[in-house]
Image: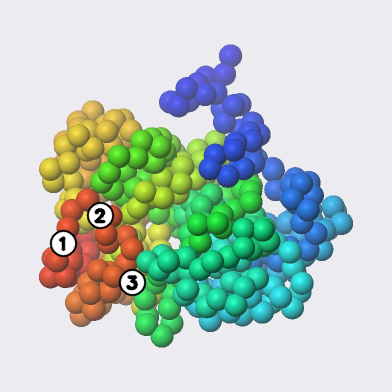
Amino acid sequence: MQQKTPFGVTQHEFLQSQDWNFPVPIFYGPGRLAEIGKFCGLYDISNPLIVTDRGSKDLQFIKQAKDYLSGSSIASSIFFEISPNPRDDEIEAGKRCFLAGRHDAIIAIGGGSAMDGGKSIGLTAWNDHNLWDFEWEKDPPEIPTENGFPALITIPTTAGTGAEAEGTAMVTHVEKGMKFCICHPNYSPSFVILDPELTLALPKNLTAWTGADALTHAIEAYLVPGFDPLCDGLALEGLALISYFLPLAVKQPDNLQARSGMLVGSCLAGISFRKGLGFVHAISHMIGAEYDTQHGLTNAIVLPVILRFNLQNLDEKTQRIAEAMSLPEKSNKAVSRAVERLLDKIDIPKSLSEIGIPLDCSERISHKSLKDSAYATNPRAATAIEMQSLIEEAIVRAR
C-alpha cells in the first residue's frame, strides 16, 4: 500500500490524470500536453495561434506543442513578442499576427506573461475596441455572445501565476507607465491543460519566484474581506499545498510529486483571487510596470511587509492560515515568521533595493498603487503616506 501524503491521497493518485470541470474544464496530469490535438478537436479548433514570451520561444514545450498539433493535422503559428511585463503595443502586434494568419483560437503557453498576452490578444482579436476599453474599472463593451471571442487554451509551464483558469490579464500601459487589469465577463479559457511535467525544466530561481507568487495569491485572496466561502476554501487548500511543496520543488527540481502539488496549489490560488488581492499586488504591479521586474520575485519581497501590516486585528483569519500551513503556534507573529522562513529557504532577497529599486521612487509608486484594482480589496486601508512608508520599508529591508 502506498503511503499517503499529508493531503490524504497517495503519490499514485497525485500523478494520475484527472478531468475537472470547475471553474472551466481542466485536464490535469503528467504528460497531458500530448493530448492537445484531441482536445482542440473537441472544440473544432483547426488553426490556433500559439502565444508565448520571448524567453520561452525556443524551449522544448513549444516544439512539443507544435509537434502534437501537427500530428493531429492542426496547423499553428507562434507569436512570441511578449515581454515579462506585457505591453499594450505588443498586444496590438499580436492582434495583427492573429488576423493575418486567419487563426481561430489562441494557445497561451508559458508563464504569467504568456497567459496575460494570450488573453489580451483574444479580447481584441475579433472586434474594433481598444485594449483599454476592457479595463477592469470600466463598463465592459458589448460583445456578441456567439463568436465574440476566439477560443482560448491556457497551458501554464510555471507553478505561480495561477492565471490559467480565469480571464483577467495585467498589461502595462506604456504611455502612463502603469499596469492595469483587463477582462470581459464573457471571456474565459475554453479549457486548461495542467501538466506538471512542463514545470520540471524550470530553473531553481524561477521555481522559487513563481512559487512565491502563488503563495502571495493564496494569502492575499484569503485576507480579502467579505463572505466568499468558495474562494476562501480554494485559497486555504492552495496555501496548504504551496507551503508544503514549494521548498521541496526548489530543493528537488525533479520531484514530480512536488511539481504536481505546486501546480495544483498555484491553480487553486489563482482561482481564489477572483475575490480580489491586496497591497502586495498593488505595489508590485506598479514597480513591474516601471522597472520591468519579475512579478513573483517582487511580490515575494514585498509580502512580509504587507503581511505584518494586514494581520493586525485579523486573529481568526490568522488562525486559519496557521492551520493551513500546519504551524504549531497560531499568532500573527508566528504566521509572519513562518512566511519569512519559507522565503529564506527559497533564497528570496530581503529588500527591493537588492533587485535595483531606488528609494526615491517610493512616493511615485505609492500614488500609482492607489489606482491599482488590488488596492481596493486589501483588508486594511492606507493613505498615500502610509503606502509610501510601506514601500520604503520594502526597499530598505522587507525582512
The reply to whether discs 1 and 2 touch (Cβ–Cβ < 8 Å) is: yes
Q: Earlier in the sequence, mark 3 or mark 2?
A: 3
- Residue 347 in percent (x, y) is at 35, 54
CA distance separating discs 1 and 2: 9 Å
Q: Position of residue 252 (x, y in %)?
A: 50, 43
For the C terminus, which image quadrant? bottom left
Please name which of the two marks, 3 or 2, marks the residue nearer to the observer.
2
Q: Amino acid at mark 1?
A: Ala
- Residue 133 vs residue 369, the one in the foreground: 133
Residue drawn at 80 percent across, 59 percent down = 46
Residue 327 quadrant: top left
Determine whether label 3 and label 1 are within 8 Å by CB: no
Question: Whole-Å distance between the Cαs marked 3 and 1?
Answer: 17 Å
Can residue 111 be seen here? The reply is: no
Q: Disc 2 designates what residue?
A: 378
| SS for dot 3 | helix
Name the residue: 55% across, 61% down.
115
Residue for point 71% across, 66% down = 49
Image position, residue 254 (x, y; %): 57, 43
Crowding at mark 1 (Cα within 10 Å: few <14, some 14-19, many 20+): some
| SS at mark 2 in the image | loop
Tell me if 278 is positioned left or right of 380 in this view: right
Q: Residues within 10 Å of mark 3 (few under 14, many from 20)?
A: many
Q: Quadrant of the N terminus?
A: top right
Picture residue at 22% right of the left edge, 38% below the top? 318
Mark linked to residue 286 = 3
- Mark 2, Cα crowd under 10 Å, few <14 / some 14-19 / many 20+, is many
Q: Are marks 3 and 2 in contact (CB under 8 Å)?
A: no
Residue type at tag 2: Asn
**Residue 107 falls left or right of residue 343:** right
Query: Which residue carries the number 1 mark?
Result: 382
Dot 3 amino acid type: Met
